[in-house]
Image (spheres, rainbow, N blue to C red):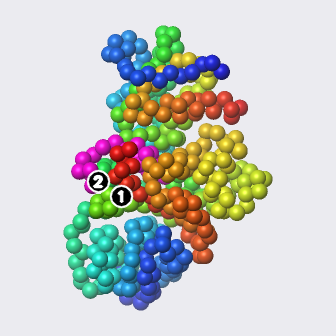
Amino acid sequence: MNTQTISVNSINTSDILSRPYISIAREFSPYTGARYRTDGPFSGEEFRENLLEPRFLQALEQGQKLLINLDGTEGYATSFLEEAFGGLARAHGVQQVLEHLEFQSLDEPLLTDEIEKYIRDTARRK
Amino acid sequence: MKRLAKIKPIYLVAPEKFSFIENPDQFSEFLIQVHEALGERKSIEVDHEKVTLQTPEALTAFLSVLADPRYKDTLHQGFIPKDPLQRKMFLDSGLCEYLKIPNQLRPPSPSGNIQKRKNYKVSPKTAYELKQFAMMRLYGADRAYPPLYRTFIELMANTHNHAGGSSDNKERWFASAYCQAEHGKTCFTFVDNGVGIFKSVSETMGILRKMAVKLGITDNIDFLRNLLNGKLKSRTGMENRGKGIPMINQLAENRKIENLVVITNDVWANVSSGEFRRLAKGFSGTLWYWEVKRQAVNS
């Protein structure tokens, strides 16, 4: 599989203005939760449904990549990441998701690899 | 409560080594006695006078039983440790909120070294507050430490989703942070009085148990080892679930959290040191203990 999500080291203001962008800490919460809404607040499901999926669809329409800034939160549980990004891949396909997402994580650079694994793992479950 | 005050309490003696980590068999037997006594007579008197050693996870586990909603209409009295150091730690732990002291000794103002929280759900705010408490105590200022925040969220989610077993009831978790600034560390405990990991797996994740049996894993110690290292999950094909416990294990392997201990059902495991053993009396719940050291946050 050639498609890869790309992590970027810096984000220009022009990037944020000109393309679909999410800062999880600023637009969702710096205190992310677990998998489902029923688990408690700021879940991966809530993030995917309210923010990630609408912006992802916007990126698809514009033929662009959605840039997601992971920095500034207290941290991420595996269930949050899996439900948000794995959940997106279950709904829209692994390839399409990989082709249209891009991440920035200066606080925890390995998070990008972890998320990519969750996205790819959804294909292995078929 | 007045009616309860007339009932002669069941007298229990706390183990001298009041520690789930260092004295697991006696301590688990003590907890069983507390559960049975509260279930039977609704009134207990616990004698801590001879206690010579206490550890934070034991105090939190005991507190979680006294505060358990199942025992809300019960009466608890106690005698506090005679040893001055143990007495201070006992009073500081907040146990006196749930344990009436007959000798009129007023608990001192909290030293601020211990924080306690409880809930049924995943509470990101609580995870943040406990992390913030540890950082403030260790550094005098808040700072980010994702491994700690992450550990709390994973454990809260596990309790919320699994600790009740096949029952629809949600179990309450109890968490504490005990700062030992002089040792440059904070000790964390996360405990619930649910059904325990192995019973929960049997009741709610039959496929995992069946797969384990197929792989020849019938022993709970082996089961826990495989659960921690993620092998069991990957062999079941449940790729999108059950990543939380392996992640915590990985944080311990990378020494982002240290001295990780798991106690559940009939297994006591110091995951960090690799020592796994069987509990003689068992523990009907799950307790996680770990430490965060100043140097880990710096690295």
Asked whether residue B14 appears in the rendered view, the answer is no
What span is colored magenta in the figure? B136-156
Label 1 SS: strand
Q: In this view, does B295 lie above or below B240?
A: below
The residue nearer to you, when weighing B177 against A87, is B177
CA gap, disc 1 and disc 2: 8 Å
Q: Position of residue A46 (x, y in %)?
A: 46, 34
> On the picture, is B238 further left or further right than B27?
right
Residue B280 falls in image quadrant: bottom right
Tag 1 and tag 2, C-beta contact below 8 Å: yes
| Most frequent secondary structure within the magenta stretch | helix
* B166 drawn magenta: no
Residue at 32% across / 58% down in the picture?
Answer: B184
SS for callout 2? helix
Task: In the rendered structure, find residue A23 and report the number of the disc placed on it.
Answer: none
Q: Which residue is drawn at 62% across and 52% down?
A: B227
The residue tagged 1 is: B186
Q: In which quarter of the image is the C terminus of chain B?
A: top left
Instruction: Report the residue marked by disc 2.
Output: B138
Dividing the picture into quarters, in which one does residue A87 lie?
Answer: top right
